[in-house]
Image: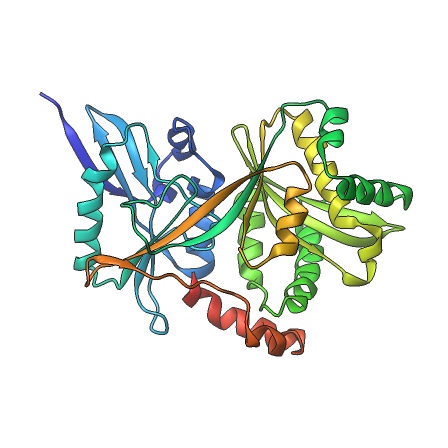
Amino acid sequence: MQKTNIQIINPITVNNWNEYILGFEDYSFFHTSEWAKVLNESYHFVPVYFTYSENDELLAIVPLMLVNSWLTGNRAVSLPFSDFCEPLLKDNSPFYNLSEDIINYSKKEKLKYIEFKSSKNRYPFETEHFRTDFRHILKLDKGETDLLKSFSENTRRNIKKANKEKVTLKLLNNDLGMKIFIDMNYETRKKHGLPPQPNIFFESILKNIINKGYGDILLAVKDETYIAGAIFFKLGKKLLYKFGASYSKYFELRGNHFVMWEAIKKYRAEGYEEFDFGRTEIEHEGLRRFKLGWNTNELSIFTTRYSIEKRKFLPVNLKTEGVHNHILNRSPVFMLKIIGNALYKHVG
């Protein structure tokens, strides 16, 4: 007799959780217990991961987190502040066994909706209501010379410019490295008219991800001055570019291109096979061109929202661009920090 089992699990409490997710083809860093801990610790989101097993074999994982907010409503998101988060399936059928349980749980918890982000399909069901963004992946299956040749002429020219300026790379996985990156991030977010993430978020990333060997802080340096930086997450054979920042006054030194090329070389040499540039909002054409310049494969990320009360999908509007950007990029950093600290826990 076949023995089936559906459970709700908190991955933070499960030993060797990452070993389980590595058994699925579509695993990503966003499925790890370390990322769950960062989101829980920083914003108090509650991990509710649905799992499906047959005869003690784990066949499906659907990660969800409860976002409880008096401002934006209570909902389940897979996952907050994550570029994408595929359901992990060893068989296509288990998700349909899980979906009704997820909906029933959401009704019991009086949630407004469930939100999913997937680059495979618009799960759990096909719908005409979805938002599309981009994801860019570079396969590290060539030597350095061939990789460099595959990049766009503009990308190669910017790498050459940084090298000519004698920009150097520093790996700084400590409190100082994170402090430097946070400061860069203040300026970068202000430039785009967005509040910066709370410091506690990056401090949690340092403690739970970087200090445990799952991430790196790479910084571009010119004459002992830090000009650009990026934070990378790593798991299995996959590398994820999660955050980037820089100082505008050093733009001509091409620090962002330099950090990215040095990271590609570094992680290729370490045996990583996939370099994921992460999510790009469809409105950010400049960032999209930057990522396409590395000869990446462009995928779509579909964001869907399923209303619990109405039992149907809702239109999705996640635009971060508008009049507010022009107001925020003229605001002082201290004001943006206050806004970020107050709002991010409501918008996950």
> Furthest residue to the top?
1
Q: How is the image coloured?
A: rainbow
Left or right? Give the position of 164 relative to 214: right
Residue 108 placement (x, y as % from top left) = 17, 58
**Residue at point 33% right, 49% down?**
64
Left or right? Give the position of 103 relative to 345: left
Q: Nearer the viewer, residue 221 or 89?
A: 89
Which corner quadrant of the image does residue 227 belong to?
A: bottom right
Q: Is residue 244 above or below residue 238?
A: below
> Furthest residue to the left?
1
Residue 8 placement (x, y as % from top left) = 25, 44
**Residue at point 89% right, 43% down?**
166
Please state, as top left, top right, bottom left or bottom right, where the C terminus lies in the image.
bottom left
Which corner quadrant of the image does residue 182 belong to?
A: bottom right
**Residue at point 77% right, 62% down?**
248
Which corner quadrant of the image does residue 202 belong to?
A: bottom right
Left or right? Give the position of 193 relative to 257: left
Q: Is residue 96 above or below residue 90?
A: below
Residue 247 placement (x, y as % from top left) = 76, 60
**Count of labels shown?**
0
Q: Is residue 171 among what the camera can see?
A: no
Q: Nearer the viewer, residue 43 or 82?
A: 82
**Residue at point 62% right, 55% down?**
285
Residue 121 placement (x, y as % from top left) = 37, 41
Q: Is residue 156 among what the camera can see?
A: yes
